[in-house]
Amino acid sequence: MKHKLAVIGLGNTLRRDDGIGVSVLESLLKHFKRPDADYFNFGIVSFDLLHKIENYSAVVLIDAIDASLAPAELKIFRLEEIDYSIKNYSSSTHGFNLKSLFELCQTLELKTKIYISGIQVKDVSYGEGLSEELKNKQGEITKEINSFISKVCNNAL
């Protein structure tokens, strides 16, 4: 039997803004934890993520993206809505990107609804701590993602 929702934070906290997914997940757990959702810090994406996803009817992934948006801009979309036609578009800042995840989900015919809460990065150089832009907007981003999670849990999407 599938659980209702998994909220999964992704990112590498040793690559500055790339750790925003993990940081937002921690904020959600501290301020907005819901009993009808499971929360996971998945760090850097790997194939093990697929095994976790398949146990849920819906998943919200929180991740850093590089989509030529303004730093700290949040974009929430379904996994299949990623536009792969843009050259040099990196939907995730990890080696195993969201495009690869989508292709595997299609191949495996997973029925899980996968939503991406992508946050535009400014600095993914080696180091700890978020850039000022992401640090200043983290609270607002967390609230927006929590609002989206509420809609998913209430079957409003």
Image (cartoon, rainbow, N blue to C red):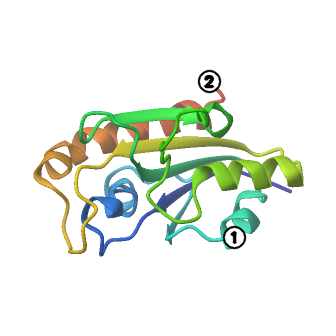
Kind of residue at disc 2 = Ala
Which mark is drawn over residue 91? Answer: none
Q: For this view, does 95 lie left or right of residue 59?
A: left
Give x and y (percent) for residue 62: 46, 51
Which residue does the numbered mark 2 point to in the structure image?
156
Report the side of 37 relative to 3 (left or right). Answer: left
Q: Mark 2 or 1 closer to N-term?
A: 1
Near-viewer residue (81 or 95) = 95
Q: Callout 2: few (<14), some (14-19), or many (20+) C-alpha neighbours within 10 Å?
A: few
- Whether residue 36 is visible to the viewer of this picture, yes or no, is no
- In this view, the residue in front, 32 or 113, is 113
**Element assignment for label 2:** loop
- Quadrant in the picture for the C terminus: top right
Q: Is residue 118 visible?
A: yes
Please tell me which residue is depicted at 36% across the width and 44% down the height of the picture.
119
Amino acid carrying label 1: it is Phe
At which x and y percent is residue 133?
A: 15, 46
Work out which quarter of the rendered image holds the N terminus and state it. Answer: bottom right
Q: In this view, does 99 lie above or below 14?
A: above
Percent coordinates x, y for residue 95 in the rendering? 53, 66
Please tell me whether residue 48 is drawn above or below residue 157 in the rendered image. below
Q: How crowded is mark 1: few (under 14 residues within 10 Å), some or many (20 or more)?
A: few
Q: Relative to residue 23, is residue 101 drawn left or right?
A: right
Which x, y percent locates residue 111? Answer: 83, 44
Q: Which residue is drawn at 32% across and 33% down?
A: 69
Residue 144 in the image: above or below residue 124:
above
Q: Residue at image x 47%, y 60%?
A: 9
- Tell me where residue 96 sits by quadrant: bottom right
Q: Mark 1 points at which residue?
A: 47
